[in-house]
Image: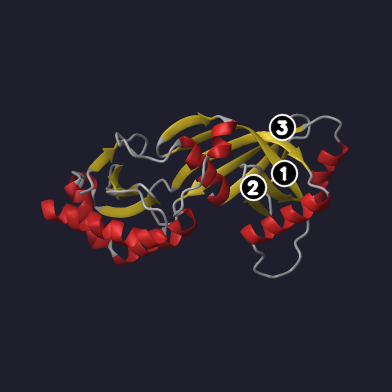
Amino acid sequence: MSVPTEANAGRTDVSSRRPRTAERARTLAAHAGSATLDLPGDREEHVIPAARAVEADGSLLLLVPSETAAVVLTSRDDVAAVLHLVDVAPVAVPHRVRAHCWIAGWLSIPTGPDAERAAALLAEAAPDPTASERAGTVVRLEVGEVLVDDLWGTGHVEPDDYADAAPDPLAGHEAELLQHLAAAHGDDLYRLAIVAGAPACADRVAPVSLDRHGIRLRTGGPDRTCDVRFEFEHPVADPTELGGALRRLLHGVHGES
């Protein structure tokens, strides 16, 4: 049976099973909805990549305007840059921004066969729905430093830990899963929140995040909101295992209420 644990304003959690900071960073790198590339110093450029993809070692491929790529081509020194990622809950909840992630490093431009592989990876990760050729140039951001500020707290990630980590296996499906839970299982979510001791602020209950270890609910009232975290009995490996994990969670908690 899963044991619910309550978080204080969505920032802390006493759970012993949680995504590691490096895993959260890799998940945000691949799936965060918003990304801005900042080139500090005299350039002071702020670019929104048209597409992005993450390579096996965690380096990021970004489709940027050709004039931005020209800065990399013409510079005699390494071009430093920071990619700022912002993750927003896919359901309507108070305080929808769930995470910020800053990935600092150095830009380069893939050439030759590497450029073809990078372009193919980028097209696969972020297909253009218009099926037209997108303007811009592919650049690679080699990771030097990572900072995550999210529902779990704030933490730095060493480049080696970031490179070795894997994104959460549910991340690519999380939006539709949370939207389905919010639309079709509101009563179940409400009962979960009540069992966890959140009735005082449970005028509204909605799922705010989901990962292989568990689900987080956000309850809201007129004066405050609070988060409640529920863990699965065992981490799930892929979306096919999620249905059973959720059923066991709901039935187990309902058996105690």
- Local crowd size for mark 3, using a 10 Å CA cut-off: few (<14), some (14–19), many (≥20): few
Q: Position of residue 150 (x, y in %)?
A: 45, 38
Q: Secondary structure at mark 3?
A: loop
Residue 59: x and y in percent read 65, 42
The answer to whether the residues at label 2 and label 1 have Cβ atoms under 8 Å apart is yes
Of mark 3 and mark 2, the one earlier in the sequence is 3
Among the two numbered marks 3 and 1 on one chain, the one whose residue lies closer to the N terminus: 3
Q: CA distance from mark 3 to mark 1?
A: 17 Å
- Foreground residue among 105 and 84: 105
Name the spot of residue 177 as percent of width and height, x first: 40, 61
Amino acid found under the numbered disc labelled 2: Glu
Whether pointer 3 and pointer 1 mark residues with C-beta atoms closer than 8 Å, the reply is: no
**Residue beneath disc 1:** 140
* Image coords of residue 182 (percent x, y): 34, 61
In the rendered view, does 110 fall on the left or right side of 162?
Answer: right
**Badge nearest the viewer, 3 or 2:** 2
Q: Nearer the viewer, residue 39 or 163?
A: 163
Q: Earlier in the sequence, mark 2 or mark 1?
A: 2
Q: Residue at x 43, y 62 (%)?
A: 176
- Per the rendering, the mark at residue 40 is 3
Asked if the residues shown at circle 3 and circle 2 are in contact, with their CB atoms under 8 angstroms apart, the answer is: no
- Dot label at residue 55: 2
User: What residue is rendered at 41% in x and 40% in y?
Assistant: 151
Residue sitting nearer the eye, 121 or 188? 121
Q: Residue at x 57, y 45 (%)?
A: 29
**Does residue 126 show up?**
no
Residue 192 visible in the displayed image: yes
Question: Which labelled disc corresponds to residue 113?
Answer: none
